[in-house]
Image (cartoon, rainbow, N blue to C red):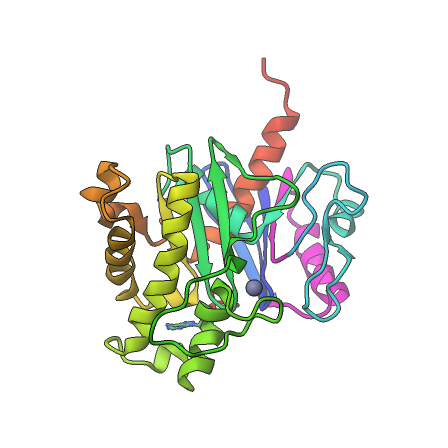
Amino acid sequence: MRIGGIEAGGTKFVCGVGNEQGEVVDSISFPTEDPETTLGKAIAYFKEKSVDAIGIGSFGPIDIRPGSPTYGYVTTTPKPGWGNVDFLGTLRREFDVPYGWNTDVNAAAFGEAAWGAAKGLKSCLYYTVGTGIGIGVFLEGRLVQGLVHPEGGHMLTRRHPGDDFAGLCPYHGDCLEGMASGPAIEARWNVKGHELPSNHPAWEMEAYYIAQSITGAVLLNSPEKVILGGGVMQQSQLFPLIREAVKANLNGYVSASEIVERMDEYIVPPGLGQQAGLCGAFALGLAALQSQVPSL
Ligand code: ADP
Ligand code: ZN
């Protein structure tokens, strides 16, 4: 079986072919330009690949409500040229295969649950902390879908006591993304995140904000695993800082052993590493294919 996958990021697109074990058979990557050029490159890639299904994990916001007239569209994104673009329809017109369609972070959460750090579990959260912050929500064996998809990166935050940074989010100022994305770190400290020493106070502050979000998410959703990916999480010193801060925030209230005794295995990097997004797209494609096949 050959599953196509598209990890559609705001900065770059990764297209690939995988198998039903989530292994990458082939992949390419190119910068995200205007929709016509970028989707044209994706179509050209899959033309020679004869895939059985395609899964797409896209930057958003996107419309994932089946039956909606704009299902499959990128909707209100501030990314120039990409607002109100029929992403899925453009692919559908070229390839008549089953499609999986969801956000980039939901795809990554789904892939991690299929083959990665949350394998065998019925729930996980997948955070990406990079140019933006997104949170994929997989609960009770499925990706959460309500009015739209969750937008956890924009939840409001309680300010760190030593932080007077205004926040960068064009919609909310000091929401989580506004305070803790890669660009927010750079704007607050006037230096790129990867140039800050690992003992710089920036990281305690970063951990404070991420941990605050995880604390709320643990209380609201009770996920069995919290997976943290994205460029900023390359700073591995963040993991122990975040785990400690979540534990301190919860203050013994959630009495699961995962939190009280095994926090090192509870808040973790992606099991699929840099391939979480692409493999997540494969998982979406595979699920779409399987849901088309009547069970015998
Ligand atoms: P994107 O979110 O665009 O898909 P990334 O996840 O790589 O891509 O996130 C890019 C952001 O992460 C940038 O703001 C960059 O400064 C920051 N970043 C990337 N690598 C590191 C690092 N090693 N340490 C700290 N910040 C990093
Ligand atoms: Zn926001």
**Of 77 and 283, which appears nearest the observer?**
77
**Of 7 and 200, which appears nearest the observer?**
200
Residue 236 highlighted magenta (yes or no): no
Image side of residue 36 versus residue 292, left or right:
right
Q: Is residue 14 above or below residue 20?
A: below
**Of 225 and 204, which appears nearest the observer?**
204
Report which quarter residue 201 is drawn in: bottom left
Region in magenta: 31-60
Name the residue at the left extreme. 261
Report which quarter residue 84 is drawn in: bottom right
Residue 272 appears in the rendering: no
Q: Quadrant of the N terminus?
A: top right
Q: Residue at x 77, y 36 (%)?
A: 67
Q: Can you give x and y, in whole percent of width and height, for residue 127 in the image?
A: 44, 54
Q: Residue at x 34, y 54 (%)?
A: 269
Q: Can you give x and y, in whole percent of width and height, for residue 135 in the image?
A: 49, 52
Q: Can you give x and y, in whole percent of width and height, for residue 215 in the image?
A: 36, 50
Question: Ligand 2 lies in which image quarter?
Answer: bottom right
**Of 178 and 82, which appears nearest the observer?**
178
Residue 33 highlighted magenta (yes or no): yes
Q: Can you give x and y, in whole percent of width and height, for residue 254 in the image?
A: 28, 40
Q: Residue at x 27, y 42 (%)?
A: 253
Residue 39 appears in the rendering: yes
Q: Is residue 222 above or below residue 214?
A: above
Name the residue at the top extreme. 296
Image side of residue 114 versus residue 117, left or right:
right
Image side of residue 278 versus residue 197, left or right:
right
